[in-house]
């Protein structure tokens, strides 16, 4: 299992707008792509002094699934134009990690 991790940042005023955009348009749009091996996505949010940080963690079966999503370069970011309009800055590359061990206790 591969996790694809990416960071984006908004102003405090745009944070709720961006989160809503992710939940109502961007995440459903990714799901509609019917990517073989795409397992889901998590959204993390943290308020900092002068901005709000968002982290997305996408889950894929393997790197082949990642390249089906973004093309030959797996580090290529996926930032739709609507997201660019509310983000103040973002990572220009995504990072990928192989899940090596996982324990779950109850549910989150």
Image (tube, rainbow, N blue to C red):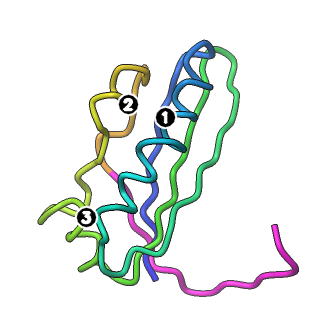
Front-lying residue, 14 or 91: 14
Front-lying residue, 89 or 38: 38
Q: Position of residue 42 (x, y in %)?
A: 58, 58
Q: Is residue 40 left or right of residue 15?
A: left
User: First in sequence: mark 1 or mark 2?
Assistant: 1
Query: Label 1's element?
Result: helix
Q: Which residues are magenta?
A: 94-108
Marks 1 & 2, CB-CB < 8 Å contact: yes
Q: Which residue is mark 3?
A: 69
3 in the magenta segment: no
- Is residue 42 depicted above or below 45 in this figure? below
Q: Main secondary structure of the magenta part?
A: loop
Q: Position of residue 87 (x, y in %)?
A: 43, 24
- Is residue 32 depicted above or below 89 in this figure? below
Q: Which residue is mark 2?
A: 83
Residue at 40% in and 83% down: 61
Query: Label 2's element?
Result: helix
């Amino acid at each position: 299992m591969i996790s694809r991790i990416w960071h984006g940042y908004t102003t405090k005023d745009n944070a709720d707008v961006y989160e809503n955009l992710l939940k109502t348009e961007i995440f459903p749009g990714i799901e509609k792509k019917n990517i073989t091996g795409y397992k889901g996505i998590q959204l993390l949010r943290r308020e900092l002094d002068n901005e709000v940080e968002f982290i997305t963690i996408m889950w894929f079966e393997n790197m082949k699934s990642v390249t089906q999503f973004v093309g030959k370069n797996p580090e290529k970011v996926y930032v739709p134009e609507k997201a660019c309009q509310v983000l103040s800055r973002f990572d220009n590359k995504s990072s990928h990690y192989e899940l090596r061990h996982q324990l779950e206790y109850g549910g989150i």
